[in-house]
Each structure stands twice: as C-alpha cells, then as structure tokens.
Amino acid sequence: MRTTVGIIGAGPAGLLLARLLHNAGIDSVVLESRDREYVERRQRAGILEQGTVDVLRAAGAGARMDREGLRHDGIELRYDRKRHRVDFPALTGGRSVMVYAQTEVCKDLIALQLAEGGPLLFEAEALAVQGVEGAEGVEGAGSGGPRVRFRHEGREDVLECEYVVGCDGFWGVARTAIPAELTRVFERSYPFGWLGILADVAPSHDELVYARHDRGFALLSMRSPSVSRLYLQVPDGTDAEEWSDEEIWDELERRFETADGWKLDRGPVTQKSVTPMRSYVHEPMRYGRLFLAGDAAHIVPPTGAKGLNLAVGDVVTFARALTYEKETGSAELLDAYSETCLRRVWQAERFSYDMTTLLHRTPDATPFEDRLQLARLERIAGARSAETDLAEGYTGFPLE
Ligand code: RFL
Ligand code: PHB
C-alpha cells in the first residue's frame, strides 16, 4: 500500500486531518487499531472553541453540529456557596463556545471519510514507524520515504508514505520512533482524577458549572437538552465501582450547593468512569518526515476543555504546511511545524494548569493555600482584567 500521508489513529486529530487533506487534493490512508463502534462511543470532550467550530464548518463537517450543537455564551463559577457567571461575548469581543460532543464530531467525520475520502481502516494496528530519519528537516529525510508496519485482518502489511502523522493518542506508537536523545518530555501528574457520569436527565443549569468546594471540584456539563454529563474530583487510583449512583448524586449535590437554594436534578446513570489527570508535552513534535498531532504529543488536564481543540490546531497547521509545500515546493512551513504548534500548546498547558489548580483541592492543601484559592476566584469575580483573561483562555487561543 502506498499513499502521500499515512495517518495513524482515527480520533478527532486523524479524522479531521484526513478530511482537510482530501479537501486540498492530497491523498491519505488512516489506520485505526479499534473498531468503528468503539471509536464512535468513547465518551470524552464536550466543548468546541469558536476556532474549532469555524474549522469544522470550513471543512464541510459542520452541518449536524450547527443543527444539534448548543452555543454557550458563558460558564458559571461556584465557590463558597456563591455563583459567578463569566460572560464570554462581553469579555472577548463576541466569542463563544459550542457544546457538541467529541463522539458526534467523530461520527460526522467518519461518515464523510467513508463516503468521500480515502481509505480508513478499522482494526488496523500500527506496529512501528520506520525510515523517517532526517532531524535536520524534511528535505533530509531517508531516501525510501517512511513506512508504517501494521496488522490488519490477521496479516502484517506495510504502508509506504511521503509523510507519517502520528495521531495515535497518548498510548500510541508513533512517538517512540523519535530518538530519545533528541526528545524532551515535560510532565506533571496530579494526585486526583475525575469520576465522570452520563445521566438521562435534563441539565440542571443551562450553562456549564465549575465548582470549587472544600470536599473537591465538581463540574456540571451536558451532551444534549436531555442528557447530563457530570464530574467529581476523586483521589488518584479510585475505581468507579467504589461509588454507587446514589453516593455520586449526594456528593454532587454537596459540592454544587448554593446559598440561594439551587437544585440538582437526578436521573438514571448510564455510564460511569474515572479519568486520571496529567499535563504532558513531547518536544519536538516533528522528526524528519514524522509529525505528531494531538494527544500523541501533548496532554492537558480536562479542566480547561482544551485537548480536542489543540488536536484540531495541530492538524490544521500540518495540512496548511503540506499544502504550501505542494504548491510552492518550499518546506518552510513544514520545518516550522513543531515550533508553531508548541507556542499554542504551551498557552493551553498554562491555562489548563491554572484552571486545575484554581478549582481542585489537593489532599495536603494548607489553610493558607485554601484562602489563596478563594482569593483567586474573588479576583476573577471582581476584576474585569482577571475575568477577561479567563474568558479569552476558555474561548481559545487563535491559530497562527
Ligand atoms: P485520541 O482521541 O486519543 O485518538 C487516538 C486514536 O489512535 C488510535 N490508536 C491507534 N491506531 C492505530 N495504531 C495504533 N498503534 C494506535 N494507537 C492508538 C486510538 O484507538 C484512537 O482512536 O487522540 P486525538 O485524536 O489526538 O484527540 C485528542 C482528544 O481525544 C482529547 O484531547 C480530548 O478528548 C481531551 N478532552 C477534552 N478536550 C476538549 O477539547 N474539551 C473537553 O471538554 C475535553 N474533555 C477530554 C475531556 C478528555 C477526557 N478524557 C477521557 C481523557 C474529558 C475527558 C474525561
Ligand atoms: C465535558 O462535557 O465532557 C467537559 C466539559 C468541560 C470540561 C471538561 C469536560 O472542562
């Protein structure tokens, strides 16, 4: 098998990249280790930045999102039994976000790819990426071009490419093809995770609620007007089965409680899982003809809702750079890929870290740190400059 761009992974990064390349007249093959149903059901992100919404529309993948997605003009911060609304358009010159689940983005992109795009192989696991050498630039890459060895339908096969893009998430193989001596990894783990539930009940509030409480963080989000998505901060290593549905609702109720008597509606829990939290950046994001995009290169804790949006930024940057190379013969933008992406990645890392430490309670927090946390929240609620900083970060950093 032979193609221009070999894409490993059919998460949002890989699927959107295939679509962008198709629109630019560049062929690609997508290899995905899991089956279609698994990819379409995996519960993850819920918030699309304005820039992501614009990219999906321009790629011709925004029709259902525009019908079914929910535009949100703000979020609510809760602390000390008080509520503070952050008004995005008023603070950012009109920007907002869209609530449209990652599962739906993936379903839309898969349907388009199968109908109009190049090959998308499910249950095709990449085993190794070879022949990408040439750290000095894409011009210096190995003569034969890179290859992806993969297993599909019980057989091993090879995909020969001009470029390989590793969109294979945090646990993927692409990253391991970059020599360790050229790599720097920046990492932080957190002593807590999120217990997330999906529940068949109308969201109790029309916008997302981020709550800081002495017992830990809680988040109210949604998937549709009749499905709620809720999260609780839990200690690292918690097993979701340790929590009964009733215990989860009781704890959510405590953490969301307000002085003005706000009420949380309960409903049947249809899914329950725990997500660990980590910050992670792999530098560089390119080695020779291998490019990393999305979670394969960086992870943010979910508090800032940035992971999917960063993945979109990476693949837009790659698609533009390759299109430029095909049109002009210049590899300038491809050579700048890693630096261009990393500038935005680090802003998202900073924002996600700030949101996480603003709202979560660490087990060993001192009373002094607790008071500082409340002072930071009071500052956001009381000073337009601080509130604007949050609104700008949440609605998204522009693509270069
Ligand atoms: P993905 O989605 O992990 O997709 C990678 C794909 O690669 C496949 N794969 C392989 N395929 C072939 N061969 C191999 N050897 C392979 N190894 C792996 C995998 O099966 C998979 O299909 O990475 P991608 O595309 O970079 O997308 C990243 C996003 O999924 C991720 O950043 C977000 O989900 C993060 N995230 C959120 N992001 C947001 O922007 N807004 C949010 O509100 C938000 N909330 C969240 C989140 C992530 C969460 N979890 C579960 C980590 C909430 C949660 C709870
Ligand atoms: C979600 O709806 O899953 C979600 C929303 C906002 C976040 C994280 C997750 O910050």
Image (cartoon, helix red, strand yellow):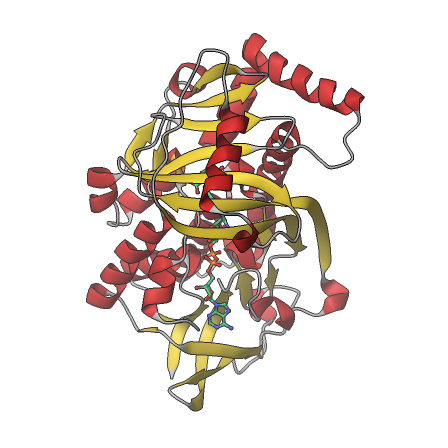
Please tell me which residue lies in front, 265 or 388: 265
- Residue 323 sits above or below residue 87 on the image: below
Residue at the image position 71 percent from the left and 36 percent from the top: 362
- x and y percent of residue 65 in the render? 25, 43
- x and y percent of residue 335 in the render? 57, 57
Q: Considering the image in quadrants, where does the N terminus appear?
A: bottom left
Residue at the image position 44 percent from the left and 50 percent from the top: 44
Residue that extends furthest to the top in the rendered view of this protein: 382
Residue at the image position 59 percent from the left and 26 percent from the top: 212
Does the rendering let one see residue 67?
A: yes
The image quarter containing residue 88 is top left
- x and y percent of residue 385 in the render? 57, 13
The image quarter containing residue 297 is bottom right
In-image side of 103 versus 251 (left or right): left
The image quarter containing residue 370 is top right
In-image side of 367 versus 123 (left or right): right
Does the rendering let one see residue 328?
A: no
- Residue 390 sits above or below residue 102 on the image: above
Please tell me which residue lies in front, 65 or 13: 65
Label count reads 0
